[in-house]
Amino acid sequence: MSAEGEIRSTCPYCGVGCGVLLRADGRGGLEVRGDPEHPANYGRLCSKGSALGETLGLDGRLLAPRIDGVEAVWDDALELVADKFSAAIEEHGPDSVAFYVSGQLLTEDYYVANKLMKGFIGSANIDTNSRLCMASTVAGHKRAFGTDTVPGTYEDLEEADLVVLVGSNLAWCHPVLHQRLLAARARRGTRIVVVDPRRTASCDAADLHLALEPGTDVALFNHLLAAIADAGLIAPDRAGAVNGLDEALAAARATDVSATGLSGEHLAQFCAMWTGTERVVTVFSQGVNQSTSGSDKVNAILNCHLATHRIGRIGMGPFSVTGQPNAMGGREVGGLANMLACHLDLENADHRMVVGSFWNAASAIPNAPGLKAVDMFKAVGDGRIKALWVIHTNPAVSMPDADAVRDAIDGCPFVVVSDITAETDTARLADVVLPASGWAEKSGTVTNTDRTISRQRSVLPSPGLARPDWQILAQVAQRMGWVAAFDWQSPAEIFREYAALSAASAQFGRDFDISGLQGLDEAEYDALSPTRWPVTREGGRERFFADGRYYHPDGKARMLSVSQRGPAARTGPKYPFRLNTGRIRDQWHTMTRTARAPRLSAHLAEPFLDIHPEDAAQLGLAPAALVRVRSPQGQAIFRARQTNTVARGQVFAPIHWTGETAPAARVDAVIPSAHDPISGQPESKAAVVAVEPFEAMWYGFAVSAEPLAPTCEYWARSRTDAGWRVELAGLTAPEDWEHYARALFGLDDVETQMVSDPARGATRIAFHRDGVLLAALFLSDEPVIAMRDYVASLPGTAAPAVLSGRRPGDQPDPGPILCACLSVGINTILSAIEDQNLMSVEAIGAALGAGTNCGSCRPEIAELIGRSTRKIAAE
Ligand SMILES: Nc1nc2c(c(=O)[nH]1)N[C@H]1C(S)=C(S)[C@@H](COP(=O)(O)OP(=O)(O)OC[C@H]3O[C@@H](n4cnc5c(=O)[nH]c(N)nc54)[C@H](O)[C@@H]3O)O[C@H]1N2
Ligand SMILES: Nc1nc2c(c(=O)[nH]1)N[C@H]1C(S)=C(S)[C@@H](COP(=O)(O)OP(=O)(O)OC[C@H]3O[C@@H](n4cnc5c(=O)[nH]c(N)nc54)[C@H](O)[C@@H]3O)O[C@H]1N2
Ligand code: SF4
Ligand SMILES: [Mo]
């Protein structure tokens, strides 16, 4: 139940789409708790969702439009955007302009952007960061089903007896769904298999981890398809029910499974589990999609489910878990360059005609796809695009070959960025920056991974001059001359129009139909409870495909003949390592929101490169060394973490750090723009790189009450409750460290304390004012040793002994925070294990609270317990 004053909304992060209950705290912030009635989470939230209230402060927020870096009024900014776009279209044609948008936009925003570009500007040059995310799944679904349907539901995960996670780190990336899976496993003994070259947190609960060679999923699933046939599991009616069975099976039999590098024993175990269990759900995500063979990987998985008719039935089916909160909504409104609204096809003249006449379109809807993300930024780079509008995404960080993308945006004649954050790597390159209303301020709908449409409701006023994205788009469209077509007063009105379009397109019998919602009035829209589509005038429908009906013209599904192709880039003497990339538990993408919450930065405060200890030894890496990673595209610097979670020859780095937080550690600077020929999705997880020690002359660790932006070759900063903490390293040392430190912190005229140990190249400097610590800098010619979490807590306190870098003997050091929800450190947990002999995750939870909220740190707690047991046993 929601209490008085609480408003229901939806979490703005991952595609699980958890319901939240929000209450304004009267100080501009929000109290947030999980909505016990939302069907995605039934009250649960992960660490990111729980910390939402801490990310809403206004410092760093974009509050007014800016033209060439100078604050402007809306009229001038909108007029300029409309003029520049109109002028480019007039002079160079509609294909000289482009929109690059986001799977985090609300459906209503997305609908407006798509209508403007495809129906009025008359170009299909609108693409989205979903190209980097879901495009291979969309392509695979369309090839197999004739439309982009996600047949699975969250309940299927709970009703399955075997769940296979392929290229999905569900424990960190869809934590609430993972918790639902683990709860089901506790009830019914669900078995879990993880297919991932890397050992992840998701493996901790798995019965089997298949650490296949990167990019060999097609070989694995083709091998499985052959095993399915050998086990006699292909129902006799299948040949009539699906097309392409014989060809797909022949291609599967021709595949050499040795490419996977998996042992015969593991392969046999996997095939036996799959063939021996009817209720199988195969969950897949970016390890599948982000590949030059991404679409084929998807179809190799779908083939196995189609061959066995384990699809759309309870507890069975392929299940693409979507990343962004509205990746699904974006696909539904046709936000990709090769799609039309309501799952209709751009290439189909009848589809174009119905949509065009419904919109009363000013231009003919283009009959061919527009530029997909990689090609779009190439066209920006070579001058074909004269005006670009980037909305709700940060491509200068997240696109492959990011330095080239950054330079392309910088060189484009006219760039507009709509964002909520004043300084992002992309916004910094724009001619016009437009302030958007943020999550808690705007209203609309999103569709989550299992097709459930949920309302996002506004609880806070928009700060400064910020406006909702749909409104900014509509106001530009109206200034371009299309007044009536973009004349909405509310998001509800846009939603009604969209639902009515789905009614008009229902004649084509596509899967996507929300015509039952076209009559919602403002109050009903406002009250809309989570609703799974389709919603026709006759009612809903829970499942697709169990009846054997698909969306190809003949009503049948297609199995595809797919063959194994490795990643585009090959390792060799110059680039001997395979670089894999992905997410960490507590940060979201380019960190513009999550990095504002100190507790979310406490888990992993610095960009890192995971490398196998034997590779590290061969490279001569000292503990905590910095490494330089080079590829043909560019380079980056990371802190090396030696771990056998990665295989020899493979390294892994997170995607989150940017020019704002660690400018040398933007991982996409080293990722090539090679992409899947069918989906256009880049191969973000399989670059080839060289790794070498970064020969720093000095290392530093700084804490400060105020933000600071150093200028040395490597730095990485994160927020703490007391201010900021920063890691630094440089290739040349300044002559005067005190002078350097003053400049770094911008401090003059303050009390200075300094100690030096020239023998070890160590210097420590602290600045106080009126007995309160403002900032401190620890320097060394080796990586700095200090109790970082403790020192980082000191700014703003008297901190008399800060220069020791150690907590005074009488106070225990909690160590790095493991449980972000309840701020419990590793050392606190370790002492509880050792001193109180608490040997289960539940016992730790009861004693310390750790792991009892979102549960995503439970695997790590279990690992700490496991290690202690081993230690005790070894003694
Ligand atoms: N904490 C957090 N959660 C998030 C996000 C976030 O930024 N932070 N982002 C959201 C978004 S937009 C997305 S798209 C999802 C992504 O969710 P996931 O896809 O689960 O996350 P990733 O970490 O990108 O990649 C998943 C795994 O693919 C593996 N992998 C790499 N190459 C291969 C391969 O060739 N084959 C196989 N089988 N696996 C491979 C990687 O080792 C990695 O563990 O997460 C969503 N949730
Ligand atoms: N190497 C590598 N690269 C990857 C990936 C990978 O796994 N490996 N993953 C890819 C994937 S799956 C994804 S989804 C992308 C994500 O990459 P991006 O989409 O580039 O990252 P975000 O940080 O989510 O960018 C969202 C931006 O929108 C702003 N914003 C927040 N709220 C609003 C709002 O309401 N309105 C507006 N207008 N702006 C707002 C934020 O401040 C931020 O600047 O990264 C991709 N890049
Ligand atoms: S799992 Fe976490 S990030 Fe994803 S929607 Fe739920 S609370 Fe938000
Ligand atoms: Mo994504």
Image: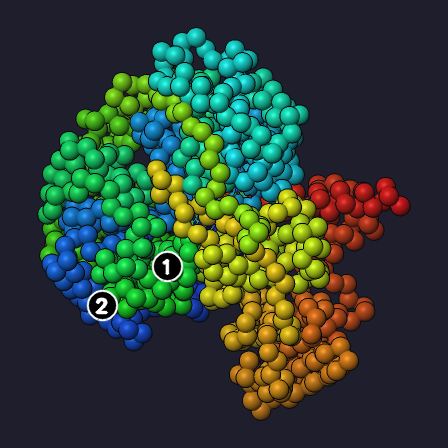
Residue at numbered disc 2: 77
List x then y, in percent, for residue 132: 40, 47
627 lies above or below 555: below
Left or right: where does residue 291 sit relative to residue 525? right
Q: Amino acid at mark 1?
A: Val
- Residue 732, given in percent of the width and then of the height, sits at 59, 78
User: Residue at the location (70% across, 60% down)?
Assistant: 620
Where residue 810 appears, as percent x and y from the top left, is 81, 68
User: Split into 4 quadrants, where in the image is the C terminus?
Assistant: top right
Coloration of the structure image:
rainbow
| Separation of marks 2 and 1 at Cα, in angstroms | 25 Å
Q: Is residue 372 left or right of residue 258?
A: left
Residue sitting at x 58%, y 91%: 749
Residue at the image position 16 percent from the left and 36 percent from the top = 352
Question: Residue 405's mark?
Answer: 1
Category of crowding for the residue at label 2, using alpha-carbon neighbours closer than 10 angstroms: few (below 14), some (14–19), many (at least 20):
many
Q: Give the mark, 2 or 1, whose residue is nearer the N terminus.
A: 2
Disc assigned to residue 146: none
- Look at the numbered discs 2 and 1 and tell me whether their residues touch, using CB distance below 8 Å: no
